[in-house]
Amino acid sequence: MPGYQYGAPRRPAVRLVITPEMEAQIEKEIGATEPRKRAASKASDRGLKTTRAPRSDRHPCGTRGAYFRHMRSNERPCEPCTIANREYRAASKASRRKPRELKPCGTTAAYQRHLVRGEKPCEPCAEANRVRLRKAVA
Ligand SMILES: [Zn+2]
Ligand SMILES: [Zn+2]
């Protein structure tokens, strides 16, 4: 039956034509799915904003955070970042040297130092603190 065979492939071709009713149906479907899609992409935008973008904003080059960012991404830290890291290390070295020049026992500073270290303040320090407290009350 050749006539039937020729007619058969023509039918799907006809079905591909989009009628106004189909258009309306598609529009309805798009209308139903698009807001969801938009909401999803908005959510991912928000996710990007809270994770990646601010992190690099907070650590522009020339900060120690950016220096570590370079290191993490296996980059050679740029000049401002290298300087920032060198300065930080110099500063932390200096602050580590400080404790040796701290005030001797018998001062409230030394008393605080004992507490910070989790030690029981020695007698001269405890006395210095008592004096300070008495002054504060008076
Ligand atoms: Zn840098
Ligand atoms: Zn002490």
Image (cartoon, rainbow, N blue to C red):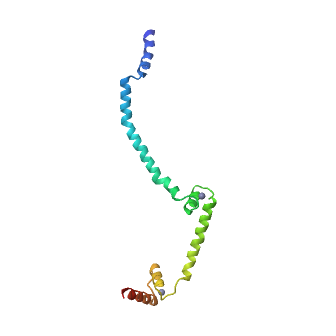
Quadrant that contains the C terminus: bottom left
User: Is residue 67 among what the camera can see?
Assistant: yes
Residue at 61 percent of width and 61 percent of height: 80
Residue at 42 percent of width and 47 percent of height: 43
Above or below residue 7? Residue 138 is: below
Q: In which quarter of the image is residue 41?
A: top left
Residue at 58 percent of width and 75 percent of height: 94
Above or below residue 20? Residue 108 is: below
Residue at 44 percent of width and 47 percent of height: 44
Quadrant that contains the N terminus: top left
Percent position of residue 126, x then y? 43, 88
Percent position of residue 48, x then y? 47, 50
In the image, ligand 1 is in what quadrant?
bottom right
User: Is residue 1 among what the camera can see?
Assistant: no
- The number of numbered badges drawn on the structure is 0
Q: Residue 69 vs residue 17: left or right?
A: right
Q: In which quarter of the image is residue 77?
A: bottom right
Percent position of residue 55, x then y? 50, 56
Percent position of residue 87, x then y? 60, 68
